[in-house]
Amino acid sequence: MKEKIRHLLEDTLPLVDFDSEYLFSELDSLGVTTILMTLADEFHVELDATDATPRNLKSLDSIVAMVERKLENRPQ
């Protein structure tokens, strides 16, 4: 899952360092929106402005954890 998300986001935002431990600080509002829209489309989960927190976007690992939580809580 982590490598799939990394590949997807690196293709979408090639100038962002997804290995950074302070990923959120590298993102502008367009970058945050792009990440949320890309992941929502790819994994068919609902992501919105309430998910755009420093905790959820701190690192690639936290992004993966957010997607996994959304997948677990997705209505079947």
Image (cartoon, rainbow, N blue to C red):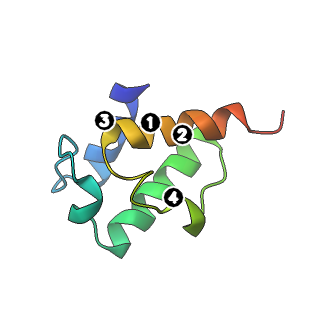
Front of the two marks 2 and 4: 2
> In the image, is 12 to the left or to the right of 73?
left
Provide the residue designation for mark 3.
7
Q: Amino acid at mark 3?
A: His
Crowding at mark 3 (Cα within 10 Å: few <14, some 14-19, many 20+): few
Q: Residue at x 39, y 64 (%)?
A: 32
Front of the two marks 3 and 1: 1
Q: CA distance from mark 2 to mark 4?
A: 12 Å
Provide the residue designation for mark 2.
67
Q: Secondary structure at mark 1?
A: helix
Provide the residue designation for mark 4.
37
Q: Amino acid at mark 4?
A: Met
Tell me the quarter of the picture where residue 7 sits: top left
Q: Earlier in the sequence, mark 2 or mark 4?
A: 4
Q: Residue at x 21, y 45 (%)?
A: 21
Crowding at mark 4 (Cα within 10 Å: few <14, some 14-19, many 20+): some
Q: CA distance from mark 1 to mark 4?
A: 14 Å
Q: CA distance from mark 2 to mark 3?
A: 15 Å
* Front one among 6 and 11: 6
Q: Position of residue 27 (x, y in %)?
A: 27, 65
Front of the two marks 2 and 3: 2
> In the image, is 73 to the left or to the right of 26?
right
Q: Amino acid at mark 2?
A: Val
Q: Position of residue 33 (x, y in %)?
A: 44, 66
Q: Position of residue 72 (x, y in %)?
A: 69, 31
Q: CA distance from mark 3 to mark 4?
A: 15 Å
Q: Earlier in the sequence, mark 1 or mark 4?
A: 4
